[in-house]
Image (cartoon, rainbow, N blue to C red):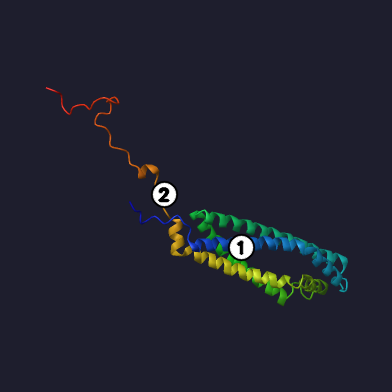
């Protein structure tokens, strides 16, 4: 007996593509967390060397270095958690859990907003360095040096990852909304063995011992 409303058990190509893209994004997030921690030492050294030529005092320099350390830790932690979350969503999608698809849509919406905000922040930092304004010229100079203290590839890397994050979440959300993905996530479970092998009809004489001759349909005369 056929079941036209049951989707095939094989995972559609669109779901496989969404899983692969989420896994790639998870690896990128974890790599970015590692890179944030690895580049901190060199960034601090370059910043201190450049800051020594400004009018800022040691306390002001130490405060900016402390801010840099906090920012590095927060960036690494957020990237690490994002990578683990994306890996978990990829595993759930691969297993065919419809709840994982819904969670992926929610995370994709949040990721789109976060990616756009991160890209805007990077552009704003590059165009207008953070500072306290003209009232504290030394602090403004320190924040102006902070962007240049990072490796030359750091700002382009962050911008590229932000753009890739926005595009990746958008593509994943669209792939999971396609009809093939919807049919696969809502497929019915396979029928049990009892449904394939119906029970034999009950004997008209259930209390008849095995091996006994069949009982007559009516009492003998």
**Residue 125 in picture, x, y percent from top left:** 71, 73
Q: Which residue is mark 1?
A: 24
The residue closer to the viewer here, 172 or 146, is: 172
**In the image, residue 28 lies at what x, y percent?**
65, 63
SS class of the residue under badge 1? helix
The answer to whether residue 111 is above or below residue 186 is: below
The number of numbered discs placed on residues in the rendered structure image is 2
Q: Quadrant of residue 130?
A: bottom right
Q: Can you see residue 73?
A: yes
Q: Nearer the viewer, residue 31 or 37?
A: 31
Which structural element holds mark 2?
Answer: loop
Where 137 falls versus 21 (above or below)?
Answer: below
Asked whether the viewer can see residue 105, the reply is no
Residue at position x 83%, y 69% from top?
46
Residue 174 horizontal/vertical position (percent): 50, 66
Residue shown at 14%/23% (left/top)? Answer: 220
Q: Residues within 10 Å of mark 1 (few under 14, many from 20)?
A: some
Residue identified by numbered label 2: 190
Q: In the shown orientation, is residue 6 left or right of residue 93? A: left
- N-terminal of the pair, mark 1 or mark 2, is 1
């Amino acid at each position: 007996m056929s079941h036209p409303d049951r989707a095939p058990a094989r995972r559609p190509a669109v779901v496989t593509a969404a899983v692969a893209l989420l896994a790639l994004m998870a690896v990128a997030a974890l790599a970015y967390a590692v890179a944030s921690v690895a580049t901190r030492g060199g960034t601090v050294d370059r910043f201190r060397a450049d800051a020594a030529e400004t009018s800022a005092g040691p306390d002001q320099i130490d405060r900016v270095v402390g801010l840099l350390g906090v920012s590095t830790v927060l960036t690494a932690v957020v990237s690490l958690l994002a990578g683990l979350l994306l890996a978990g969503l990829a595993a759930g999608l691969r297993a065919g859990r419809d709840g994982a698809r819904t969670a992926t849509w929610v995370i994709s919406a949040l990721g789109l907003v976060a990616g756009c905000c991160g890209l805007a922040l990077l552009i704003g930092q590059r165009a207008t360095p953070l500072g306290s304004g003209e009232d504290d010229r030394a602090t403004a100079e320190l924040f102006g040096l902070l962007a240049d203290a990072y490796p030359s590839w750091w700002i382009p890397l962050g911008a590229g990852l932000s753009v890739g994050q926005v595009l990746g979440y958008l593509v994943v959300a669209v792939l999971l909304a396609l009809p093939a993905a919807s049919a696969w996530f809502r497929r019915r479970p396979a029928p049990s063995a009892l449904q394939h092998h119906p029970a034999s009809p009950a004997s008209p004489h259930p209390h008849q011992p095995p091996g006994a001759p069949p009982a007559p349909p009516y009492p003998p005369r």
